[in-house]
Amino acid sequence: MPGTVRFTPRRYVTKIWDFGNFDISPDGRLLAYSANREAHWSIYVRSLRSGREWALVKSDKPMRNPEFSPDGRWIAMQADLDGDENFDLYVAPSKGGEPRNLTGHRMDDASPRWSPDGSKIAFISNRDRDRENVFVMSASGGDAQQLTVIDEIVSEIAWRPDGSGIAFSAGVGQLDWIGLVDLQGRVERVVSFPDAEAHLGGDYGHPFPWSPDGRRLAFASNLHGWNDIGVLDLATRELRWVVRNRREKLRPVWSPDGSRLAYLENRDGNVQVKSASASGRGIQAVSPAEGVAQRARWHPDGGLVYLHSSQTQPARLIAQRGSRRRVLVDGARVAVPRGELARPRLVRYTTFDGRKIPAWLFTPPKARFRNAAVVIPHGGPESQTTNAWEDGDFAGQYLVAQGFAVLFPNYRGGTGYGRAWRKISDRDLGGADMEDILAGGRWLLEQGVCPPGRLGILGTSYGGYAVAHCLEKAPDLWAVGVSIVGFFDWLTASKEERGNLAVYDRQKMGNYATEPDHFRKYSPYLYLEKIRSPVLFTGGANDPRCPVNDVRQMVAGMRRAGKTIEYLEFPDEGHWPRKKRNEIVLYERAIEWLGRHLPEETGARGKHARRRGTRR
């Protein structure tokens, strides 16, 4: 391959920051954000006036999810050490200082939210029967009070502005509903539909669904087939749809004066911040149409702050007032060598039953192309590869720089295309959705993107599960596979996984205890003898989502069957590396494995160019 590849994990993983949640102080002067920078996740505070920035705490624990106290003097956050997702809650002075542990429970305590008067902190914990519920405690620490006792799993919480209660989202994707609980533990369903889901936000980050006067609650629901933005008047119980169309919309946030709602709208994997009047009129586009905006928040002065990135632009924290945009924090600390990247192209190919599958296609510069391609199915499975930097569970641009074409298929059962598309895979995870992925690989061959024998597949989590399934279902299609923190035996994984995933699996697939044959049908571990391609497996010793024992079982079975494999396990990580040094190792091993089994072909670029010309 001519020229030196500059865009490599070792050079850029620590030079391009990952962002998590952020918060703005009540007086609008400070920004607190979580980022994975040189070592691991931590919290940073920045003056929005002077630009001066400081690390909130010094800790070996990955700190995330900051929220300012109502007086702006303190910041609450959460941390775990080795990726097991059993978080503890901490508070620290917003000026910086020693963090104080408020919980220290062996189970998970996460999503801290200050009460409006600053005296309490509400949070979500699975300390009751491994089921996430709403808890509240004094802001100074001490015993916590459990407010809800439900089995559906609480995922989001938001205090009512008068502090009298907490709104919450409950469910894992099947008939999810919104409740309101007071401080005595009285629960009321306030938004619930017999054949649809409803959420306070439905996107990463804290929801802010309450109007400033606390009388109206905004939410997102797919009652009409697509996630629309609704508003409930708590006094009259009148429900009004503010924004309704055939696009997925999430995370409604009230403006400080209560006159407008900002929300996120997804159009084929480009996600834009928009705002509408409280009556649904005067819809305005805020962020760029291309790329992905996340976690939009109103600034106290009426502007908006949001994260934005695209597949060619690393994430940036942006403040916008009117049409004027200002970059607050740029995640790219060095210039990205754009000549080694690829602009993604949205394509659609036909799968086995005639449905059109949307996918992002990356083709490297001709001078770098090694005449090989990699298919990367996303995790979830209720997820979507979007036009965001490093989206799709693996940074495809690192593969592009090495000369690979990359296809990210958004197969059935994922998000972004309405409720019917998301529900079509119920009780069939590992069935028709795998055929959609296989169709993507065959489409690459039919289009002449690469020749037979030059196709690999890589995936993370459910995508790692998909890798094993696809290698087994179509062994002649693939030359190599990389399965990152996947699962392979539904029975083993179901017995050891975390409680919220157990609830999800029962709703999506059924009960493994009463219908084991149904689960065996979809377990690639039982059909591993069909796999012919060499496979790199990875696992995290503390993974609560895809238990490492299931990965080890698959690895042992492959070795007994005489298959060509390698196994990489991180003893100090969970579902995905949180430590930068481990992330670099993961990327490098995956890239080396693909390159070893899909080496550059001498003269391949010229032959490929002639094929493409002939087709035209």
Image: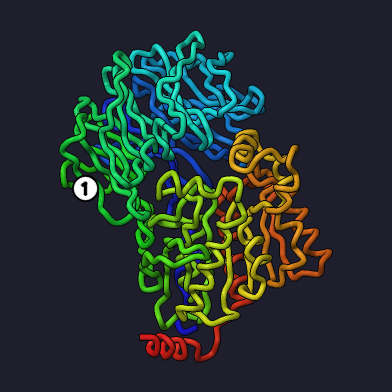
Report x, y in % for residue 330: 34, 51
Residue lying at 58% horizontally and 67% vertically, measured from the top left: 457
Q: Is residue 135 above or below residue 570?
A: above
Question: For the residue marked with disc 1, what is the amino acid?
Answer: Arg
Q: Quadrant of the C terminus?
A: bottom left
| Residue carrying label 1 | 325
Residue situated furthest right in the rendering:
560
- In this view of the protein, which residue sits in the foreground, 445 or 102? 445
Q: Quadrant of residue 256?
A: top left
Q: Position of residue 447 (x, y in %)?
A: 45, 78
Residue 265 image point, x, y percent = 31, 45
In the rendered image, the vertical position of residue 372 relative to residue 269, given as above or below = below
The residue shown at (49%, 65%) is 351
Scheme of colours in the image: rainbow
Callout 1 crowding tier (Cα within 10 Å): few <14, some 14–19, many ≥20: some
* Horizontal side, residue 144 vs residue 609: left or right: right
Residue lying farthest front?
353
Q: How many marks?
A: 1
Which image quadrant is residue 366 in? bottom left
| Residue 326 drawn at (x, y percent) | 23, 47
Q: Residue at x 39, y 22 (%)?
A: 69
User: Residue lying farthest top?
Assistant: 184
- Is residue 214 in view? no
Say which of 496 and 526 sits in front.
526
Query: Left or right: where does residue 114 sit relative to residue 583?
Result: left
Q: As drawn, is 350 to the left or to the right of 485? A: left
- Secondary structure of the residue carrying tag 1 is strand
What's the residue at 46%, 57% (across, down)?
A: 410
Q: Is residue 352 visible?
A: yes
Foreground residue among 425 and 460: 425
